[in-house]
Amino acid sequence: MAFRGLLAGSLLKRVVQATSLPSQAAACSSSNMLQALQQQHTSSLLPACFTLLRGFTASPAAAAAAEPALADDEDLPAIPIEQQEQQGHYRDIIVPIYDLDRQSVGSYTLGGDIFDVPVRRDILHRVVRWQMAKQQQGTHKTKGRSEVRGGGRKPRPQKGSGRSRQGTIRAPQWRGGGVVHGPVPRSHAHSLQKRVRRLGLQCALSAKVWERRLVLVDTLRPAEGKTKLVLGHVDALLAGAPRRSVLLCDSSLEGDDGGEVLRRGAANLPWVDCIPQHGLNVYSILQRDYLVITRAAVELLTERMRRPIKPFSPSP
């Protein structure tokens, strides 16, 4: 709990510093910071941050225990991925950039707010369940007593036989009768908040980085759309990997870093999937062992993930 309070206080302090309240950053407590920000920035983009921070500052004891450490809080510098010893500290990570032959051609800094968030399995479960529910067909159907064939006449007289009263042979208690309260075609989709969907994608990306299963390349576009070329490049990028199922992510379907040429070459490889960055999702990331993503895709993805969430916006 103390770590959660420390993290909440650190985030609040940085928000205060970024919103021209440096004097309150050093003197105020976490609760006072939150009240001051709400009063002076009611129409800004801070409400989403308040919602997140309230979950961290729910315990007054944890926040009070973390107050002494806030005075010395500073932005942590980016570290190479080889030096990452703990996960979920929102720290920028420096990763190498490879070409298609896995030769290093530079480095790139991944934002810690996207690629180093705490991995929450409950959020991943919720997002995957939401995705699978949307994909479910929902075409199940059984016939009721009014839909099955036959049963128009009364099987026996109402009185005089000494047996039970029956009006039709297609009642549920009869063999061949209709089904009571059977399934009908419907949609299994349910709603999920945009911030939860975005957090799920951040958790999935952070898990791949922590497991060293995210490979950053400058381009995924082969010289030709040949399966043999794509297979050779994937083998080089995943050299020594125990499992080779991979998700290739480029900037767009018509991008210069992959595009149609990449998809034509990977079409016959069942363990290789191709996806543009705007379609990157939690289920696809977790389904494959490795994620190979281009630099252009990371830049576009980072820009999209840092965009403020607006009510009723179509994209997460």
Image: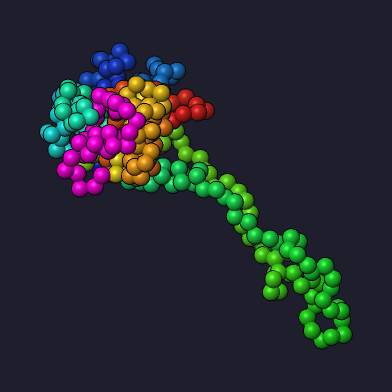
- Within the magenta stretch, is there residue 250? no
Q: Which quadrant of the structure image shows residue 26?
A: top left
> Which residue occupies the foreground of this view, 30 or 184?
184
Where does the N terminus fall, quadrant-wise?
top left
Q: Which quadrant of the structure image shows residue 29?
A: top left
Rendered residue at 32%/15% (across/down): 19
- Residue 240 point in image, percent of width and height: 16, 43
Q: Which residues are magenta?
A: 215-244
Query: Would you place residue 124 above or below residue 72 in this image?
Result: below
- Residue 166 point in image, percent of width and height: 79, 75
Rendered residue at 19%/44% (across/down): 241
- Residue 249 point in image, percent of width and height: 33, 32
Where does the C terminus fall, quadrant-wise?
top left
Rendered residue at 82%/76% (across/down): 155
> Which residue occupies the foreground of this view, 46 or 2?
46
Rendered residue at 58%/46% (across/down): 187
Tell me if residue 219 can be seen: yes
> Which residue occupies the foreground of this view, 51 or 84?
84
Query: Would you place residue 140 above or below residue 164 in this image?
Result: above
> Which residue occupies the foreground of this view, 256 or 214?
256
- Residue 290 point in image, percent of width and height: 27, 40
- Within the magenta stretch, is there residue 223? yes
Tell me if residue 297 can be seen: no
